[in-house]
Amino acid sequence: MSVQVVASKMAEVELKDIGGKDVPAVAPLTPKVEEKPVVKCEPVVSPTTPVISNVAAAVDPTLPTPSPNLMKMPQASAMKRTDPQHNGGEAFISPDGTVTEAPRTVKKQIQFADQKQEFNKRPTKIGRRSLSRSISQSSTDSYSSAASYTDSSDDETSPRDKQQKNSKGSSDFCIKNIKQADFGRREIEIAEQEMPALMALRKRAQGEKPLAGAKIVGCTHITAQTAVLMETLAALGAQCRWAACNIYSTQNEVAAALAEGGFAVFAWKGESEDDFWWCIDRCVNVEGWQPNMILDDGGDLTHWIYKKYPNMFKKIKGIVEESVTGVHRLYQLSKAGKLCVPAMNVNDSVTKQKFDNLYCCRESILDGLKRTTDVMFGGKQVVVCGYGEVGKGCCAALKAMGSIVYVTEIDPICALQACMDGFRLVKLNEVIRQVDIVITCTGNKNVVVREYLDRMKNGCIVCNMGHSNTEIDVASLRTPELTWERVRSQVDHVIWPDGKRIVLLAEGRLLNLSCSTVPTFVLSITATTQALALIELYNAPEGRYKQDVYLLPKKMDEYVASLHLPTFDAHLTELTDEQAKYLGLNKNGPFKPNYYR
């Protein structure tokens, strides 16, 4: 039998962008034959507070159901077999039974199309790409929601030093790269499909313009989900200026899409502390424009205005705050008599506590840890500091993956819940030497101090799921005797003189939004609550709200929940007149008292 030598090359699968909101389909494989193939790899709280007394009646809108998208599987173009006697060499079998086998080829050195980056080199800020994601040559211009890929040609230049304009000639923004706008727009369109309540609210109230004349300054995570909220507020008549509440969570391509759409956005991924406050100041301090509403996440924006521009509060109608950290600050201001305007506590609303804090963290904690460390959870010993809604979500996810989970807690009620959920309640110093992962989610400060960091085992992973970056005492690690070694984006080794090292994620900042993504649908619930709170505060007659912190009424919580039920084709049971009378309730709600949490 004669043997004819042939050469084969693996086909490349190109991801083609398809217009509209459909998920890109996968193009079929096209095998190519070349004489000298080159293998390329692409690198891949709360005190008792008054509540709102007046809420508009809810009307259920008709919500569209997103159409499914199908992925095409490539078809094999030739029949192959692998012959173990030829060291795994491949052979083609023709219809007449003749075997045509491929020769042993000389191994080629793996090269990277993007800067030929080597795995054993420390990634630099310039042109850094995530090695955990594999992308084809045709998709090198695509941008991930988890880590924004940037144009390496201008990474050395700070966005503050660039002169950029959108297609309309406006330059009232400061972002990484305006050229990424098209990719950001596609991500926003995907997010819209998972945020039905905001889209319904936009459709219902667009004609009424309930926020006409509102000038909203915001400081939140700038993600595709936030972009849907901002564009909804604009559709309802508001003008918006926005900065990021976290230096690592901004999606550069989304910021570009917002800037292209005419929004004044000042944010980029990887800001310095100085950049962070500069961006907030650029949102607030602008000639001819003064905010009359504040949407804050963490209280930094509110703090900055109090510190630098206190006279602005004469025209500000109210503050909407969504984080536990920011809410604590508002209660402190109120107690000291320094709160100048009414404030809405969104964090303690049922739709935030029982959905965003719980379900969002239950899914995103695993995502963040996997993307950054590739850790296997089965059998790992994990201590979760805090058993509030965030802690509950984290513990449930880790337990389901086979981890041995310990909990620390100061509140006896939450502590009892942890015990009855099957977790062992401990003090941190009792387990700090043996655990593999330490997760903080308390909203407090100095939860993990240098004493605990010194006692951790070699290779211990340390991260934070609370909003603030004060829970882990990162500042105590910046000393001459300790060595910091960058592993990849948002992952650092902190090395002790004896060689022990810990793995610190996101420098102690919020893990999920810094290192991965969060479920869009859950954020739709929170964002809708924020939008309704802004509408209520802005349109409230003078005197309805005093200079205090207010909780959302259960009627509004129930309305937000009802807007999301059609997505699941869910059907509510209605009370009969007799049942409603027996329970002492209105048939249309609210079904819970205002003190319910």
Image (spheres, rainbow, N blue to C red):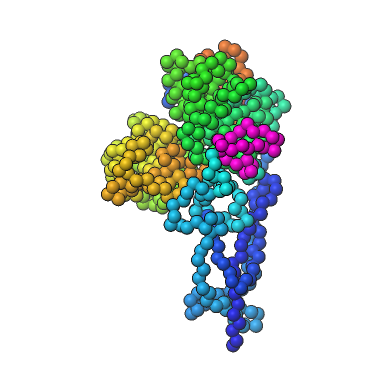
Q: Position of residue 477 (x, y in %)?
A: 34, 40
**Residue at the image position 42 percent from the left and 50 percent from the top:** 487
Residue 449 lies left or right of residue 17; in this view the side is left
Residue 24 lies left or right of residue 248; in this view the side is right
**Residue at the image position 28 percent from the left and 38 percent from the top:** 451
Residue 560 shows in the view: no
Reply above or below: 440 against 287: below
Between residues 270 and 394, which one lies in front from this camera angle?
270
Which quadrant would residue 228 be assigned to in this image? Answer: top right
Is-magenta flag for residue 166? yes
**Residue at the image position 45 percent from the left and 38 percent from the top:** 510
Residue 38 lies left or right of residue 272; in this view the side is right
Q: Main secondary structure of the magenta part?
A: loop
Which quadrant would residue 319 be assigned to in this image? Answer: top right
Q: Position of residue 293 (x, y in %)?
A: 58, 22
Q: Which residues are magenta?
A: 159-181
- Looking at this rendering, what residue extends furthest in the right direction? 207
